[in-house]
Amino acid sequence: MAFIDYYKILGLPKDASENDIKKAYRKLARKYHPDLNPNDPVAEKKFKEINEANEVLSHPENRKKYDQYGEHWQHADEYEKAQQQQRSQQQYQRQYQGASGGYSEEDFSDFFRDMFGGGGGFSGARGGGHVKFRGQDYNAQLQLDLKDVYTKHKRTLTVNGKNIRITIPAGVEHGQIIKIKGHGGKGVNGGPNGDLYIEFSIINHSKFKRDKDNLYATVDLDLYTAILGGDLLVDTFDGQVKLNIKPETQNGTKVKLKGKGFPKYKKDGQFGDLYITYQIKLPTNLSKAEKDLVKQLQKLRK
């Protein structure tokens, strides 16, 4: 994977403080946030880079590894372990050479040449060979509309120039992360590929508020139907249903429509509920005759 200068992405020097990193990230994240730059692929790419840079530099241990190993920082522990093994092998070689004139220095490959696949690996008395390293994990963000995740569907993503066909289950939530195994960075020296982690950014343009697999909506109810009762057509996420309004329904009354909510994640055919809150709308621009009738009603109620 090509080297990415996280300090440059955040516009910071390498000796930046933790507070400097936090401030730079917040400033740039606000500037390039997808909600403020809809349908802007350049801003979306920049936003991903900013988050990736912050993920590494805001954690002291990750930052230390990045400063030392660059784009291979995620394999720092493996590198250090391999270096320690090599030092032990070299010590063994020196001892063996002193005792019996065995191996020469040329029999031992340079660690970093071994690490990145150059030359022949060590194959002495204690085994060895090329050190295999797992490829780096990739992180991506996929922005979808709420209606896109109401049903299961397939979608093609382009990650690092490669097209990946994935199935998106119905009911995926905002901020949810799924793993696509083996679609990350290529392994080193025959090691396994890394994984691809996709974070979903769900934009809601509907009139429904979502809370996991339940939906919430406010429905206008005219005064006369609220008082006398009657039928009312209301929207659900996938169509309309007719509700029977009870006489003398009060403002703010809530009703539950079972099974009319959002699909439950990876549970085919199962849905949450839809909660409707009635909001009574008072009539306006009353005629004189209407006002007189209201006055008569007022007198009767007294």
Image (tube, rainbow, N blue to C red):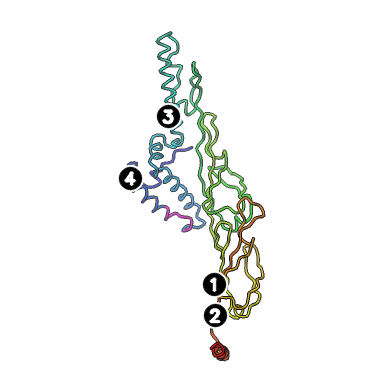
* Residue on which the image places disc 3: 80
- Which residue: 43% across, 13% down? 104
Query: Between residues 235 and 258, which one lies in front from this camera angle?
Result: 258
Task: Point out the stretch of residues depicted in magenta.
Answer: 29-35
Question: Callout 3: helix, strand or loop?
Answer: helix
Rounded to the nearest whole Å, what is the CA distance between mark 1 and mark 2?
A: 14 Å
List the residue tagged with mark 4: 17
Q: Distance between the Cα atoms at labels 2 and 3?
A: 73 Å
- Disc 2 marks which residue? 282
The quarter holding residue 238 reads bottom right
> Where residue 250 appears, x then y in whole percent?
56, 75
Q: Secondary structure at mark 1?
A: loop
Pick whichever of labels 1 and 4 is earlier in the sequence.
Answer: 4
Percent across and percent down for residue 147 are: 60, 58
Query: Which residue extends farthest front?
Result: 302
Disc sitting over residue 252 in the figure? 1
